Image: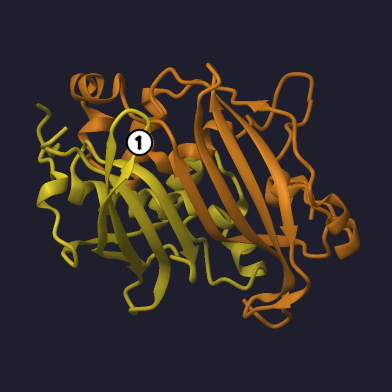
Chain colours: A yellow, B orange
Amino acid sequence: MIPGVSYDQRWWEHVEQGAALPRVEDEISYRRVIMNPATTWDYFPGHHDPDYARSQGQPTIYIHTMHFLGFVDRLATEWGGPRTFIARRRVSLRHPIFAGDTMVGEGRVVRKYTEDGERRARHLVELEVTVTNQHGELCCLATVTVELPARGG
Amino acid sequence: MDIEATGYDIPVGTYEDAKAMVGTTTPVRVGEVDVNVPMIRHYAAMVRDGNASYWDDDFAEEHWGGVLAPPGMLMTWLIPIEWRPGGEAPVPLLTARVPLPGDTLINVSHDAEFFAPIRVGDHLGVVEELVDVSEEKRTSLGVGHFVTTVSTYRRQDGQLVARTTNVLYRFTAEEGQG
């Protein structure tokens, strides 16, 4: 066991439709935006060059798609636990998160269902996740389908 | 816009040039690195994600058969290294190779379906297809076109691991903004 790592797992049987996911707030400094190209090798200048971002009509550099994806997945898997498999994730990017902004992630359970898989039934949950900024503006709307372990196998 | 400005050599062209490219499918392009622990943990640190599947080797081995790659990293495994000895330029993503009037771009939507966990040691290849270029549309950023691509990712053993549909906006920023 590694200190600070959560091993709590949610089982499909225990999921309640309509339940809220824990809210997550994350302050995004310039350093964190620069970590976008550093960690993913995506050097599009909107994520590291404020002059370029301004030439696009933006006030400064902003996080990239893969950071939104990681944040949305983090919300889903912190709620579900480390055995949660992201099966599908649809993301609509509505407004950038700029350096200096705070990302606020919220979500809820929309649907709980099973589906025939190759060898066994898949136990799935559909989540709706929103990412807003500190002004309450919607920045990203996501629908995430996760597969959870089930007590019945 | 040249390579130095954007990191991508975005070709300029007309809407008709872009429409003529719809249906284009790329050859398989194989990633330059295997899925690896240092990149996984650096990304997880960026997102502040303490998932045991990314940080605990033993846990990940037991449940996934190896350290799991955060699914949000999918595109990373196929980003080309931007310089190589001899100066041969890397091939950019298909979506950045569509000739259009707009001199810049921003991403607007991304839909990903995953068919198998992506783990340390996997080596991914991608095939990209240009499926749509919209007519000219005005938004709060300027005037441009929406470009839709579908990317199919397979592992070295042929296993399909993911399919994504991405839409980006190729536009020219309005005067007076920014």
The N terminus of chain A lies in quadrant? top left
The C terminus of chain A lies in quadrant? top left
What residue is rendered at 29% in x and 59% in y? A127
**In this image, A85 relative to B111: left or right?**
left
Task: Provide residue B167's location: percent of width, then percent of height.
Answer: 62, 58
Label 1, secondary structure: give it: loop
Pointer 1 indicates a residue of which chain?
Answer: A
What residue is rendered at 56% in x and 61% in y? A50
Q: Can residue B172 be seen in this view?
A: no
Quadrant in the rendering for residue B163? top right
Q: Name the residue under label 1.
A: A117
Task: Provide residue B20's location: percent of width, then percent of height.
Answer: 88, 54
**In this image, A9 relative to A36: left or right?**
left
Q: Is residue B53 visible?
A: yes
* Towards the viewer: A105 or A89: A89
Task: Provide residue A16's location: percent of width, then percent of height.
Answer: 14, 60
* Towards the viewer: B50 or A22: A22
**In this image, B59 relative to A38: left or right?**
left
